[in-house]
Amino acid sequence: MLNPNYELAALNQTLLTRIIETESGEADLVLRWNKCISLCADTICQLREKVRSNGFSNDEAEISFFKEIKPVAMSRFLYYHELLKLEAGELTGSWKMEKERLEKALQDASVFIQTNQDLLAYIRSGSYHYDRLYFLRGARGWPNCPDLSQFDDLFSTASDERLARLFANELLMRYIDKKLHQVSDQQSGQPASSQPALLSCIASPTAVALLGVALHKSAFFSDGALKVSKNAVMKHLGVCFGIDLSNHSQLVAQAMRGKHPERLFKELNDAFKRYMDELDD
């Protein structure tokens, strides 16, 4: 019987390592995406064979696999297919048409994520009360991705493929956003490597740490995985704002003993209301 937290997770880690090597070592984009698709397909086939031959020791192991293991490989498989289609359709003759094409692809990805926000919020919040319906084989009455039916009932639950597509669309939106900036830079004659002037954050580390807690709990960030850790969010904000948040837990604990959190978010809410009032004027 399988313990997906170890043996099968190792297959995913190997896949991600090989993807990084492929992306950095292959200059031709079409070849790069095709190689990545092959790597993902091979891993998915290995995962399926292990499920077929070994099964799961209990329902918890099965849920863990379809919630945390399979969507990682499957999301990359879908993501690189989308990149290949995006690259094949590139319009090099007109920056305006290419920009419109990329914006349409970005909108499509965003619409899918918004349409399936219930599942994404469920995962990012760390919930588990619907796990048996979402991630056990044989459950019925929940949305599926029928176009992925080549991975049959042995290897699919009601929602693992929908979750994989959500992760894939998040990755795709980041890629398209970067491409749109490149198109804009080319049109304006601005070097693609140029960066805007950096701003200085004048808020206190405590305020940024509190903001980080709120962003983390609202699942504001994604790295294409199940759930971004609070430490990862704080590290990201620390880099963005040039603030040391290594002691973020202590900062938040100190703030919670006073009225700092309520005051901070009231100020942010009031500032937004002022902005909305200005729009109405």
Image (cartoon, grey):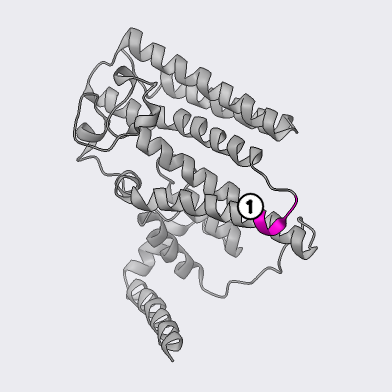
Residue farthest along the top direction in this orientation: 53
Circle 1: residue type = Lys
Find residue 52 and report its image quarter.
top left
Q: Residue 135: tell me if it is visible.
A: yes
Residue 218 percent across, percent down from the top left: 36, 57
Q: Quadrant of the C terminus?
A: bottom left
92 relative to 49, above or below: below
The residue shown at (48%, 46%) is: 170
Asked if the magenta segment contains residue 158, the reply would be: no
What crowding class fits label 1: few (fewer than 14 Cα within 10 Å), some (14-19), or many (20 or more)? few
- Judge by depth and name the residue closer to the eye, 266 or 20: 20
Q: Residue 194: tell me if it is visible.
A: no
- Judge by depth and name the residue closer to the eye, 71 or 57: 71
Residue 108 percent across, percent down from the top left: 47, 50
The residue shown at (25%, 35%) is: 134
Dominant secondary structure (helix, strand or loop) of the stretch shown in magenta? helix
Residue 228 percent across, percent down from the top left: 44, 46
The stretch of residues the image draws in magenta is 93-97
The residue shown at (39%, 75%) is: 264
The residue shown at (67%, 44%) is: 90
171 relative to 103, above or below: above
Residue identified by numbered label 1: 178
Residue 188 percent across, percent down from the top left: 76, 65
Horizontal relation, residue 103 to residue 145: left or right? right
133 relative to 277, above or below: above
Q: Quadrant of the N terminus?
A: top left
Horizontal relation, residue 132 to residue 266: left or right? left
Label 1 residue SS = helix
